[in-house]
Amino acid sequence: HGEKRGRTSRTRRECLGYVGIPEDQMEEAVKQIPPEAIDLMKKMVAAAEEHQAKEAEAKGASKESKDSSKAYESIKKIGNSDEASQMKRAIFIWDEERAKEALKELCKDKVPEKVNGAMLVMDQVEWADPADEKKWPDALMFCAWDWFSDQANTDVPFVPPEKAKENCAYLWDEKTTDAWLEKIGMKAVGKKGKDLIDDCGRNEAFSDMDEADKVLEKLKELSIIFMKDIVRAS
């Protein structure tokens, strides 16, 4: 019993220490705190520490985001971008003029002051209206997937630099495609990446529509990841 009381007193002292009570006043204060208040105090302290940690992380991420945005200048050429077909929605090579033109419908009269395709892909845009910032992820997904899926069937597909090829699914052979399927928890089907990007090919490979839909969603996510890879490789 004495050991338990000793542990309780130590716990009280630890909690009091968090709120800055001087050592010479702590012993008297400890005696006045009812045991049932200890758990509440500990939860409050833990919640406060978690909140402060999240704030510090958010501030650090914000600073990193703003600093990093300086590096994302317009990409004039990368890989065979000057020769590849179906590059209208290749956001990563949009210059400032093209980016602003594309954003007019989304942002109306509040187009960001400084923007280009690389900045859009990497989420480095200072949006004039927070509502537009919330709309952009869906617009990015639409454009990225539209371009990505076009590349699977075009005459001259975009070929990225070597260090950006890992997620270029439309160029995958059967072995690479099966390895990716295994990674996302799906069965190997012995198909090329472009076969899974194609609706008919994907539905043929997966008779279960839930499985086919899962692969489609993962490929859509991959189309954005691939664009980010390209920007980083520029």
Image (cartoon, helix red, strand yellow):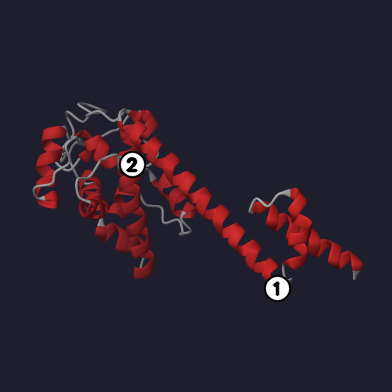
- Residue type, numbered disc 2: Phe
Vertical placement of 17 versus 35: above or below?
A: above
Q: Position of residue 82 (x, y in %)?
A: 17, 28
Q: Quadrant of residue 115?
A: top left
Point 36% across, 38% down: residue? 65
Upstream in sequence: badge 2 or badge 1: 1
Q: Position of residue 26 (x, y in %)?
A: 75, 55
Residue 157 visible in this rendered orientation of the protein: no
Q: Position of residue 37 (x, y in %)?
A: 67, 70
Q: Name the disc covering residue 3, or none.
A: none
Point 17% across, 29% down: residue? 83
- Residue type, numbered disc 1: Glu
Say which quadrant the N terminus sits in: bottom right
Q: Position of residue 68 (x, y in %)?
A: 35, 32
Query: In the shown orientation, is residue 53 left or right of residue 40?
Result: left
Say which quadrant the C terminus sits in: top left
Point 37% across, 52% down: residue? 191
Q: Nearer the viewer, residue 73 or 86?
A: 73
Q: Name the disc covering residue 36, or none.
A: 1
Asked whether the residues under the numbered discs 2 and 1 touch, taking CB atoms below 8 Å apart as contact, a structural biologist would say no
Q: Which residue is mark 2?
A: 226
